[in-house]
Image (tube, rainbow, N blue to C red):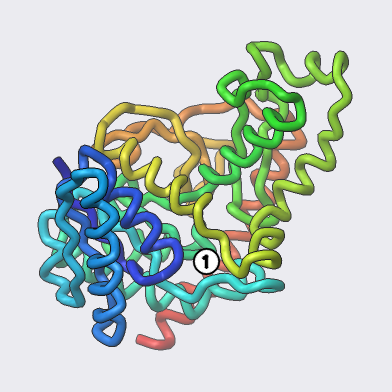
Amino acid sequence: MAKVSVMGSTGVIGKNVTFKLARAEIISEVVLFAREESLDKAKGQSYDMYDALAAEDIDCLLTPSCNLEDLAGSHIVLISAGVPRKEGMSRRDLAFVNGKIVSEYAKQVAIHAPDAVILVATNPVDVMTTIALDASGFNRDKVIGVGNHLDSLRLKTYFARRLNINSSEIHTRVIGEHGDNMVPLLSSTTIGGIPLKYFIREVELDIKDIIQTLRNAGNTIISKKGATEYGPAYAISNLIVTIITNTHKILTVSLYLDGEIADVKGVSLGVPSVLSKKGNAMIVPIHMNEYETNKFRMAAEEIRKLTDEVRESLKEKD
């Protein structure tokens, strides 16, 4: 049984992740960490969740708190705190204000939960992963960003729905930036074990339209309902459960690279990772065609530039 702390528990993503985790049999306690001025809201959410959990005879402990000492003993600390993206905003727009928040929280995790794995969900997630790594001083395998896990799930679903094929038959992945510079790995996508390039010779499939839909997915949802909610929350919960259960699944998360993929170093990007209870057990080597490799390196340079700018802004504030 594991303890998970959610920093940013009163936000749209944080509260949904909390409730999803509370219903997982492997979770014994979820700390709903919030700022002091939001503590009453966190308490209210916990009372509401307890009522729902009672209907399913679930006894998970929910701990609303603004006391950093309550992070102690956490197996995973999720950092989802920060300014959410609104319609028309890019993830880049959030970088500087959220960088300060993530940096402060990561420092506190290192003090109060030094054995925890940090999972970063705050946007822009690739930049924030490096900021959390810097601030915590943790080994890079213990600081993981949500990365392209949701993007990969979305792409899998798009193929399944448009082809009317069970999603379990779709094996695909998105890497790179969680944003405009994401890189769908079409060259290694298979459907029912058949490489995509052969499969589409027999069916009508508009690949360009699918990729454009994928890149616009977040903005499309935000424009229609104000925020992304269930998709990110379930994707994050999926990552947390995978880490805690030590199942060694390969999922696409943001990690600080040291040349493992396309010789890219010194930046966090979404890559396939074998996840274990210690965090990242191994970055999985992948084959990319020339186009995908170039796009991945372009994403690296864009994220590196923004990360350096955020790092400098944090130095100035110190």
Residue 212, image x, y percentages: 78, 48
* Residue at position x 72%, y 24% in the image: 164
Quick one: 102 or 3, which is closer to the camera? 3
- Name above or below for residue 255 compared with residue 159: below
Residue at 17% x, 50% y is 60
Q: Position of residue 263 (x, y in %)?
A: 56, 39
In depth, the one of 78 and 260 nearer the eye is: 78
Question: Label 1 sits on what residue type?
Answer: Thr
Q: Give the quadrant of the N terminus.
A: top left
* Residue 97 placement, left or right of 136: right
Res. 181 in view: yes
Q: From this view, report whether residue 152 is shown above or below residue 97.
A: above
Residue 149 in the image, given as x and y percentages of width and height: 51, 43
Residue 45, quarter of picture? bottom left
Q: Pointer 1: residues within 10 angstroms few (<14), some, or many (20+)?
A: many
Quadrant (top left/top right/bottom left/bottom right) for the C terminus: bottom left
The answer to whether residue 1 is above or below residue 100 is above
Please state if 111 lies on the left or on the right of 296 as rendered. left
**Figure quadrant of residue 90:** bottom right
Residue at the (86%, 34%) spot, across then down:
206
Towards the viewer: 286 or 163: 163
Using the image as rendered, state which of residue 220 and residue 209 is in the foreground: 220
The residue wearing badge 1 is 307
